[in-house]
Image: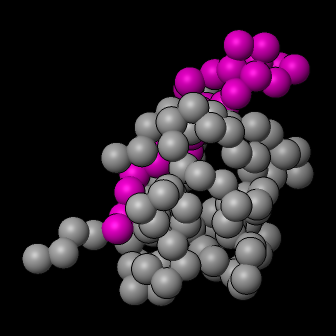
Amino acid sequence: MTSSPLKKIRLELARTKEFPEGNPRCGYEFTAPLTANGHLDVTAYKDHKAGCRVHRFWEGEESEHGELLHLGRDRWVFSYAPGPDDDEPAFKFEKHTFVAGEYVSITEHDGVTRPFRIVSVH
């Protein structure tokens, strides 16, 4: 039996002007297929798309639940409803290695791109 390539990845807000120490109560948990070296696996995504989910948690706001979408060669977004109006683009997700301690950037609903630290991959 082959194990699923899906991994649960937790991102927490890294240092920003508003949060100089970052904020572990603001971030994302999402499920995505990763290659053996920690990159997003586009081929496996096609077979496991239904399992690629996202949970956005933000202190003082309602949690949001949606999906990780691959919208072409190098475009990944978190989406919470049909259509692009609420999509949160992930900056160069296809180039990142998803391992604890690395950083990624996400453009959120308010149009601001914020840094997030990868705190765990299970």
Image coordinates for residue 73, horizontal then vertical, percent: 73, 82
Q: Quadrant of the N terminus?
A: bottom left
Quarter of the view holding residue 68 = bottom right
Residue 17 falls within the magenta-colored stretch: yes
Residue 57 in sight in this render = no
Front in this rendered view, residue 46 or 18? 46
Q: Is residue 1 above or below residue 99?
A: below
In the orientation shown, which residue stands out farthest toward the top? 21
What residue appears at the point 49 percent right and 84 percent down from the top-left corner? 43
Is 122 left, or right, of 68 in this rendering?
Answer: left
- Asked if the stretch drawn in magenta spans residue 115, the answer is no
Where is residue 113 shown, x and y percent of the image?
A: 84, 45
* Most distant residue in the front direction: 37
Residue at 46% of width from left, 48% of height from top?
9
Residue 45 in percent (x, y) is at 48, 78
Q: Residue shown at 55%/79% (left/top)? A: 42
Extent of the magenta region: 5-28
Q: Is residue 116 above or below residue 93?
A: above
**Of residues 38 and 20, the one drawn nearer to the viewer in this rendering:** 38
Decide: is 2 above or below 111.
below
* Residue 70 at x, y percent in the picture: 63, 77
